[in-house]
């Protein structure tokens, strides 16, 4: 659930900070394989994630393209840097 909340908050930040441009593309990387599968509609979501998923899917419409990818934790330096910093 924390991963889904982080994705939602990140997308909200992009949208609300008015850094949106026409045709912006977004790549979402997560080490949560289950979340990636749910966001890509490759798996059925747990009820506790539904609110987050619907919010994320709604916000995806603001972007020209959104690619959601699984990235193993050891390969995701950006996420590791944020986690260590916080």
Image (spheres, rainbow, N blue to C red):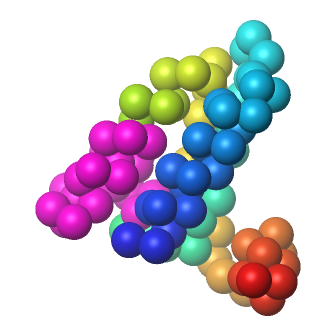
User: Going 81% across and 28% down the picture, which residue do you hit?
Assistant: 19
Horizontally, is 68 left or right of 41 in the view? right
Using the rendered view, name the quadrant where residue 41 is placed: top left
Q: Is residue 14 visible?
A: yes
Range covered by the magenta-colored residues: 35-56
Work out whether 49 lies above or below 12: below
Residue at left offset 24%, top offset 53% = 50
Which residue corresponds to the image point at 79% horizontal and 17% vertical from the top-left?
Answer: 21
Please indicate whether residue 72 sits to the left or right of residue 33 in the image. right
Among the 4 quarters of the image, the one containing residue 75: bottom right
For this rendering, which residue is in front, 73 or 3? 3
Q: Quadrant of the N terminus?
A: bottom left
Query: Across the whole image, how many numbered discs are drawn on residues?
Result: 0
**Residue 19 colored magenta?**
no
Residue 40 in the image: x percent, y percent?
A: 40, 45
**Residue 5, percent across and down?**
47, 61
Can I make out residue 42 in this image? no
Q: Residue furthest top?
A: 22
Q: Is residue 13 left or right of residue 69?
A: right
The image quadrant of residue 56 is: top left
Q: Is residue 72 above or below residue 40?
A: below
Q: Residue furthest left?
A: 47
Q: Main secondary structure of the magenta part?
A: helix
């Amino acid at each position: 659930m924390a991963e889904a909340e982080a994705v939602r908050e990140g997308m909200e930040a992009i949208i609300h900070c008015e850094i949106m441009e026409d045709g912006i593309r977004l790549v979402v990387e997560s080490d949560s394989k289950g979340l990636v599968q749910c966001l890509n509609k490759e798996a059925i979501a747990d009820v506790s994630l539904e609110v987050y998923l619907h919010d994320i899917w709604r916000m995806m419409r603001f972007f020209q393209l959104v690619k959601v990818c699984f990235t193993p934790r050891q390969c995701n330096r950006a996420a590791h840097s944020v986690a260590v910093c916080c």
